Image (cartoon, rainbow, N blue to C red):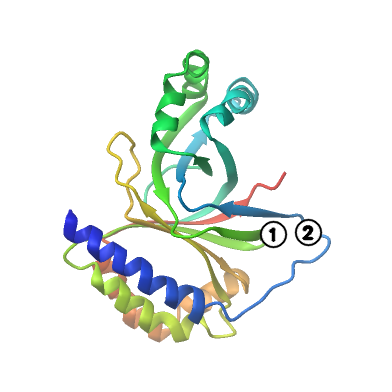
Amino acid sequence: MQTLQIIMKSLIVKTTFILFVVFSFLACHPAMSQKSQILTFKANTVVETALLTIKPGKEKQFSEDYFSQAIKFAPTYGARPIGSFALVDRKLGNAPAQMLVFFEWESLEKKRAFEKDLDFLKIVNIRNDALSFLTTGYFRVEQDISYTFVEGNTYEFTALWLDPNNAPKLQEYFEKVGPIATNPKVGFQPIAQLQGLGVEDRTYHPSLIFLSEWKRGTKGRDYALNHKDYKAVLPLRTAAAPYIDMFLIAPMIQ
């Protein structure tokens, strides 16, 4: 476990340079007619990530009877909603989720205190009854990250479970995939990298999560994934991360 943590720490430093310096060549100004929203991930906080599916006909029960009630007292425990996304297309993995939600907590201790609050206990079963699927995990970011999400743009969520014996191959993969990602026909833009905290009382435990945007949309993504050089280096990622959840997602902008 300690060896994996050392490898992941090295990956965070190295891949941050590769992803945020080498890849961030492209600037984008959203069209005025499109809705947009700035989402912020803060360092020194706990980022709860939830994948969920609401039962048909239970949308009001979840949003009004549970969530709108929970949000009234959750800030007392240092809680802040970060953002929500609809899962548009599942590319890898088997999680039967329709939504992705990020929520900030001041600390694990505060989140656990929230879950013991009598007001929460009164409504948690309303939530459980409204959902057919729910899995959650705790993560963190190394530095504050703010990014503008635009309605209609193409975003990707990727969660990787690393194999400790092959984790260094992920670094090699990033280095070799760089020239493809920076191709103007691709328009790949990294947004955030989250590291799993490995908290055992949760159910979602990827080692790393990446959020990214395909500035050229699905056309740019398809170009990259069908490129012969990408196909040549893909086995490195597969060896490093034997299981991956990968979804195309759409921001749910208020």
Q: Are marks 2 and 1 in contact (CB under 8 Å)?
A: yes
Q: Residue 90 in the image: x percent, y percent?
A: 47, 54
Q: Dot 1 surroundings within 10 Å: few (below 14), some, or many (20 or more)?
A: few
Q: Residue 87 in the image: x percent, y percent?
A: 54, 49
Q: Is residue 235 left or right of residue 124?
A: left
Q: Is residue 163 above or below residue 105?
A: below
For marks 2 and 1, the one nearer the N-term is: 2
Q: Which residue is mark 2?
A: 34
Residue under the image location 40 percent in, 85 percent down? 228
Q: Is residue 69 above or below residue 159?
A: above
Q: Is residue 81 above or below residue 77?
A: below
| Secondary structure at numbered mark 2 | loop
Q: Quadrant of residue 246?
A: bottom left
Separation of marks 2 and 1 at Cα, in angstroms: 8 Å
Q: Residue 247 in the image: x percent, y percent?
A: 48, 56
Residue under the image location 59 percent in, 83 percent down? 185
Residue under the image location 33 percent in, 82 percent down? 232
Q: Dot 2 surroundings within 10 Å: few (below 14), some, or many (20 or more)?
A: few
In the rendering, which numbered label is found on residue 105?
Answer: none
Q: Is residue 155 left or right of residue 240?
A: right
Residue type at mark 1 is Gly
Q: Which residue is mark 1?
A: 152
| Secondary structure at numbered mark 1 | loop
Residue 92 in view (yes/no): no
